Structure formats: structure tokens, C-alpha cells
Image (cartoon, grey):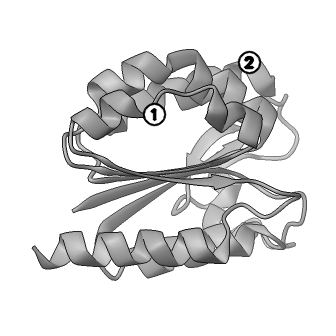
Amino acid sequence: MQAHIFAEGSNTTGEDHDQPVKEYYEGLFGMVAGLDDELAEFADTHLHVLSEEYGVASGEERMSAVYAGDQTPVGSEDMAEQARAELLDVAAHADVMVILLSTDVFQQTVEEIWNELVEAAKPESIWCLGAARSSLEGLDFEELETKGCTVLTYQRVGVARIGTDTREELLEVVKRKAAQ
């Protein structure tokens, strides 16, 4: 079973650039890294970390290989373009899609390609979306549900990437699917 998590890095970082991207980011990114670890008990997980500095990186890549620090940041447009491409690339074979993004990034990525994402979505996959209420309300989940997909949403409040209840529900649904 394949699980893909898309989330932005954090402003709080470690000092050691020679560690995986997943460990380099600290603070509230810990919720995302922890979710990645928990999902790894049931699925082959792939963490996609978005940053205006380097674009999109795998959570397993070494930070020192991703971003030297003295290079020109890619910026929000290139980051969004990379993220849209990766979202579309993995949607067709992902059994679990977890997308936890801030309002601006969600609008630049997911909202821009929503119809294509839904069309590409693997039937009977699990989708968990964490974003602002206004962003989530603008999406039509009916087509995903028609494909037999399970859709979980978390309306972001403040800086929390995913709520405890949504996280527990996601893990339970993934656990059931893994047991089938």
C-alpha cells in the first residue's frame, strides 16, 4: 500500500543540514513527521515537503543535498508548479493521499488542479485534506466518493496541520484497508 503526504516545511529548523529533510524541520512539523511514522506501520510512505527555498523534496533526502543555503530560492510559483506535478504524478497509484497545506499553498496547488487530481485518483483510495474551511468548501468531493474513495477533511484552525480526531480517524481507516 502506497501513502503520500504533502506538507510544507516549518520555520523552526535544526542546525544539522546533514540529516533527512523530515528530521531537519522541527516545531509543528513534528506532527507531520509523526504521522508519516505512524502511517509507515501500514503502508510504504512518501513524504513530500514543500518549500519556497528548494521546491519539493522527499522527506528522506538529506537537507544538505536539497538546499545548499547559498543558492537562489525557487520561489512560490516554481514550488507550486513542482507540487502540482508531483500531486498528479502520485495520485494514480496512491492508496492514501494526505495533503496538509496552508491556505495560499493549497490554493496554488490543489485548487488549481482539483479536477485533474480527482480524475487521476486511484479508485477506493483514502484522501485526507487539511486546509482552511474556505478552501475545503470550494472543492467538490462527490466525484472522489463516486470512485469509492474515503474522504476525510480537517478545517485548519491556527497552525495545527491536522487535528487529533482527524488523525485518529485517518489511521483507523488506513489500518482497516491494510488488513483487507
Q: Amino acid at mark 2?
A: Glu
Q: Position of residue 59 (x, y in %)?
A: 55, 60
Q: Quarter of the image holding residue 109?
A: top right
Residue at (67% x, 43% y) in the render: 50
Q: Position of residue 165 (x, y in %)?
A: 59, 75
Camera-side residue: 154 or 74?
Answer: 154
Q: Position of residue 49 (x, y in %)?
A: 62, 50
Where is mark 1, residue-wise? Answer: 87
Give the left or right position of residue 11, taking residue 154 as reference: right
Residue at (57% x, 31% y) in the render: 83
Q: Nearer the viewer, mark 1 or mark 2?
A: 1
Q: Amino acid at mark 1?
A: Leu
Q: In the displayed structure, would residue 19 be above or below residue 135?
A: below
Where is mark 2, residue-wise? Answer: 77
Residue at (85% x, 60% y) in the render: 159
Quadrant, the C terminus: bottom left
In space, the residues marked 1 and 2 are separated at their CA atoms by 15 Å
Q: How crowded is the residue under tag 2: few (<14 C-alpha within 10 Å), some, or many (20+)?
A: some
Q: How crowded is the residue under tag 1: few (<14 C-alpha within 10 Å), some, or many (20+)?
A: many
Q: In the displayed structure, would residue 18 be above or below residue 138?
A: below
Give the left or right position of residue 118, taking residue 61 as reference: left
Camera-side residue: 122 or 71?
Answer: 122
